[in-house]
Image: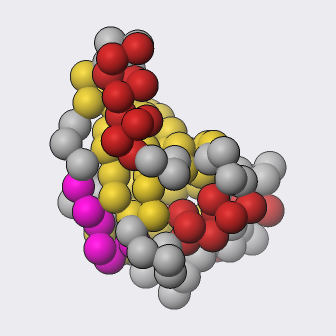
Amino acid sequence: MIGRLNHVAIAVKDIAAATALYRDTLGAQVSEQVAQHAHGVTTVFIHLPNTKIELLEPLGEGSPIAKFLERNPDGGIHHICYEVEDILAARDQLKANGARVLGDGEPKIGAHGKPVLFLHPKDFNGTLVELEQA
């Protein structure tokens, strides 16, 4: 069902400092900061030859990333994102197998402009999983 690894998301307190670390220290190609108001985050993508790293900074106190940073003040890996060919078929198959889809179960438009869903971390070895339509 899952395709390639699309990205690994890292929650950060200071996206400018984290971007500089990847760009200046590691020599990575980085995107511009983009506010994702519907998701309560600001994102930057670090482009790697085989995948991406997504830096996430809270956009307001109600952000789910703000809550994550309260529990993990130094930041850290927030989720991993896999591509799927058909997000609705993947959702239905996962639910039939007992996996919990977060929210109302309907895909939302993610940072790449494609439909995404999140799966409960307790169903995936403690890891929040994002599925993105390929």
Relative image position of residue 8 (x, y in whole percent) = 50, 39
Residue 132 lies, with reference to residue 4, above or below; the image says below
Front residue of this view, candidates 39 and 73: 73
Q: Residue shown at 36%/34% (left/top)?
A: 19
Image coordinates for residue 24, horizontal then vertical, percent: 33, 17
Membership of 110 in magenta stretch: no
Q: Is residue 38 magenta?
A: yes
Q: Provide residue 122's location: percent of width, then percent of height.
A: 79, 62
120 with respect to 102 (left or right)? right
> How many labels were placed on the picture?
0
Q: What residue lies at 43% left-to-right and 80% top-to-bottom?
A: 106
Q: In this view, does 36 lie above or below 102?
A: above
* Residue situated furthest bottom in the rendering: 104
Please determine whether, in this image, residue 103 is positioned above or below residue 111: below
- Where are the magenta residues, as a range? 34-40
Examine the rendered structure and indicate whether residue 76 appears above or below residue 107.
above
Residue 119 image position (x, y, % from top left): 61, 64
Q: Residue at x 35, y 28 (%)?
A: 20
Q: 100 and 39: which one is in front? A: 39
Residue 133 seen by the camera:
no
Colour setting: secondary structure
User: Can residue 19 be seen from the camera position used here?
Assistant: yes
Using residue 13 as the reference point, say whether residue 39 is left or right of it.
left
Image quadrant where residue 133 sits: bottom left
